[in-house]
Every structure is written in structure tokens, then in C-alpha cells.
Image (cartoon, rainbow, N blue to C red):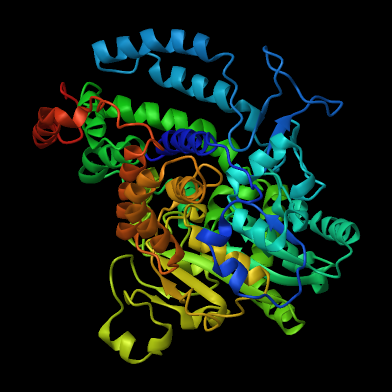
Amino acid sequence: MKKLISVFLAALLAFCCILAVSAGAVYVENNHFKTVYPELFELKGDGNNYPTIILPGINHSPYYLADETGSAVLDSNGNELTSTLLLLDRTPLKKDIVKLVPRLLASLLLQRDIGATEGISTLVYDLMHYMDMNPDGSSVNNLVTKTFDVPVSEMNESDKKFFYTMLPVEPIAEVCGENNLFLYTFALFGDPMESAKGIDGFIDAVLEKTGAEKVNLATVSLGGTMLSAYAETGKNLSKVHKIVNMVSLLNGTDIIADFIDRDFNVSDDFFRKEYFPIVMESLTGDRTLGNLVNILLHLMPRKLFEGIVSAAYGTLHDTLIVNNPQFWAMVPAERYEALADKWIKNDVLRTKTDAFQQARLNLKNNLISMSKNGTEIFSVCGYNLSYTDGDYSFFGVVKSSESANSDGIIPVSSTSLGATAVKAKTQFSKEYLESHDSKYISPDKCVDASTCLFPDRTWFFSGQHHEVGRNDAVIRLTALILNGAVRDVSSTTLFPQFNGARNSRAMTRVPQGRLFAAVEAMEGDTISAQQKEILRPAYENALAVIRDTSCNIEKTEKANEELLEAMRKVGLEPEKGKEEFSLSKLSFIETLDKFLFDRFGGEGFFR
């Protein structure tokens, strides 16, 4: 049972990532940032506007399948076989489904496996085979990572749109300049120590192009593994002026460790009762759809369900997951040795993963050495969430979710370089609080910043989901750190060390953000004076909420709803459409789900 769940999770993750890139975004001149983000212009930097190289996250490095000559392989429609996360082969999907359906129906009818597990295993392999990894940690196929050798200002329209869609860092572009922003991509299916070897040459190329003496490094999520590797072997460390880690994977995440070890919470009370409603609610906003999934699963005997799941996950685990050095770089250092001894059987792969483990064990000392030589190091973190919280709630099935304090993806101890934390939504003991400096204890009493490597240069956002691009305040803080206007947590009261959370995307996403459209209307002549007066109260409130960098989820949501309603009244937003039908209106589905669980537990109807 535990073997198969990850396939379901991986498929959902891919689905979420596809959705995440569906809305375009660009940096534009005359974008009203002076009105919405005045501190970007009022807080003066230190005058050292060094170019910034972004070491990006898991979904930010495009790659393509290449033939033996290095040319991109094309699909049947003449398009490149390319992706940023999962490169899927949909060609045999129809054939595999046609074979699988009668096997599933026969298995349901006879209540035993009639080739269903074999069919699902074949389907999963055919779908995922482009990403196969050899036992030595090399890729079976020729997957080539796309590189960007020019600043964002010189990217073509397509690449620039991709950049800002995946990395909504427009405030950084405003402060530092697009001509000073660069993207260093790396292989998701590869060896992080090898990937990091290119950073030295990339830094030299950036310095030559810009004429600068040093660069800044901004790591995002998975980009933290590149920092770990580069800090161990890099030759240009003295040319790094600042490092800003944004929710960066600096000591792995238990999610990946649990995936590798097949350690999941599959108790009936969680997996067959709560899990699917939680997941469906986060994906579709409708928990009742998950109740319906629970009901349908009762048609299948437990043994058959577990067999199908095990077959699907086993197809991925032993190749794509266990054989990928980059995945091993996501395992926390303290869990690495035991898991590597258990799962890695190839000496070449073990040599690769051991090299990264040593780099990670040395990271703190390497960063201390860089700091002593003049590099300033900062971190921005989210915390106070379990892995069940947030849009990727399907990760909540891992056992570690029961004790996590994270941004929903990465533990705060990892993103902060060592903060001490207790389980999300709990508090330190009275004895702990009395014996530690209250200055560094979070207001919700679950994080102690004093144990960070750089406690005075680390910021925490309580309840902030891992995708911090949704919180404009995080990006604005990063921009001001990069230009020197913010030097530590005491530099300004605008950005307290311990902050709240918000999702301001609907209002501030460039260029189509609702608040920016409202500014355009209020300052222009697209609506009448009378309409402006109708819009003004909601507009001014939304503007005040976004200008306030002390974040509050509820205030932001309320301000967005009020602004939306006011913009509808003056014709800047379409009228609310007819409410779509929702399964949640069928309350009997949830009632039936509860009845069937109480009657059958995790078993099928015909146990």
C-alpha cells in the first residue's frame, strides 16, 4: 500500500504545476509600483547594485528530450518534447487505457486482481519513461536543460513570460533592473554536484557582461541545493556579495525522505476517511468530491486497491526516485545515511550522493567562512504549517506531517539554517520559553530564531505557504535586501522578523492584478468621476492593506473581495456569473461516506 501512494501524489503535483503556469505575467514600465509599493523608492539602498543570479526552484528549469546529435526530439504534432517538471509520454496512453479498463472491470466484478496491477504498472511506466534513471544515477534518456545566457532584459518574449510566470519577482526587477537579473538553470534529473560546477563560469560571464565586480545569489526552494554544492566546491565564492535564500531547501525536507522510505500515514482513519476530502478541497475547493472518491473506493477490495497502488509506485520508486541524485539532495542530512544504506545499491550512485551529503554537512561552516570574507547572507522562511496545510495537501500523507513545522513543503529548520521549532500550531514548553531569549521567540511561540546560523538576517512568515511569490511583501523584502536598503531585521519596522502571511496574487500579480487595474482607473479617465467615488472606498482600503507589509490573511482576503465587488459595480470586472453546480450541495454524499466508513472502514463492500 505504502509503495503506491506517491504516484498519485506525483500526478497531482504535476497537475498543480501545470495550473501554476497557466497565467502569464510580465514586468512592465509605468506599472504603478510607486503608488502600490512606495517603500521600493523611499528606502534608499547602499549604492552597490550588483547583478543578481537566481538559482531557481523545482519547476523553473525547462528541459527537453534530445536525440544523439543534441537536437530536440519532436512529438507527432511537430512540437518539442519539453517540460519543467514531469515530461510525460502520452502517445501510448490511449492504448494502455483500452487494455486497462476491461481488466479493472473484471477485477471489480470478480473482486480479485485480473491483470489490473500489471496494467496500471505498464501505464505508469509508459507515461513516465522519458525520466527513467539508471542505477548509477545517470539519465536513461538524453534530457537537456535549457540555459539562459542573457539577462532578463534581453530574453525573448516567450522566455521572459516564462521567467515572470514562474518567478513573480517584478519588484526585484524594479529595484535592481532587468539588466541585472539572470537565471541559472540546472537539471532536475541529474547530479547536483555536477550541476553546480557551471556556476563559476556563469558568474564570470555575468561579471564580464555587466562590468560588475561581484554578484548576488538569490536561491529559491530547490535552488538551495545548488548553494550547498557550490559553497563546497566553488572557485568564485569571493565574488559573491550577497546570498538571499527564499524558502530554500538548505537541509532537505522529510517529504522526500518519507517518499524514498515509503513511510506514509495509511491508517484507515486518515487515508480512507480524511485524505481524499482534504486533497480535493485544496485542488478544487470542493471537499465533497473527496467524499465521493471514498465511496467509490469501497467498490474495490482492500487487497486489490493496495496492489494497484503498489504496482504504480513501485514502477517509479526504483528508477525515477531512488536512482536520482537530485532527489537524494532533498533528503535531510540527519536521515541520509540510514536511507542511503537501505535503498542505494549502486556504488557510483552512492559516491554521487555521498559527495552532496558532505557538502550539506559542511554548508554552515562554508557559509560562515564566506561571511567572514564579506558575503552577507539572508534567509526568508515560512512556518507554522504541517504538510497537510496549503495547496499541496496531498503531501500530508507522509508520516512526518504529524510533527512538521514548515511552509507546507520544507521544514523551517531547513529554510532558516537551523531555527528550533516545535510542531506547527503548538508552543514551546514553559521551561523552554523561560530559558531562551524572548527576542528571538516567535509571537506564536513555536519557532526560536536564536539557533539560526544568521539569526539577525532571517525573517519568518507564519502560515505562509511555500509559494511565497503569492505574497508581495516577501518579494519586496527580498528586493530591498538585494539593493542594501534592508541590512538586518532591525533595519526597518516595515518588515518585522516575525510576520504573518497572505495571498495577494489576485490584487498584485503583474500586469493583470486587480489593484493595479484599479490604480489605472483611478488615475486615468477610463471611468467617470462618479464611478471613481463608488470605487474609492474599496480601492483605498485595498491599497492600504497591500502597502502594509505586516501581513494578515483575513484582511487581505476581505480587501480583495470588497475591491472585486466595487470594480464590478463600475464595470472594471465582469458581473458575477451564475453560480456553478457544486457537489457540496448534495449533503447526502458526505453522510453516505461517513456511514460507509463506519460500516466498512477501509474495506470494500464485498469483504
Residue 571 picture quarter: top left
Q: Which residue is found at the position 40% from the left and 14% from the top?
A: 115
**Image location (x, y in percent) of residue 97:** 45, 12
Q: Which residue is found at the position 16% from the left and 36% from the top?
A: 601
Left or right for 161, reference 203: left
Residue 589 picture quarter: top left
**Image location (x, y in percent) of residue 393:** 36, 46
Left or right for 462, reference 10: left
**Image location (x, y in percent) of residue 551:** 39, 65
**Image location (x, y in percent) of residue 415:** 53, 65
Left or right for 360, reference 391: right
Res 251 seen here: no
Q: Which residue is found at the position 67% from the left and 46% from the top?
A: 346
Res 421 seen here: yes
Along the line of sight, the residue nearer the viewer: 264 or 402: 402
Q: Quadrant of the N terminus?
A: top left
Residue 141 picture quarter: top right
Along the line of sight, the residue nearer the viewer: 176 or 136: 176
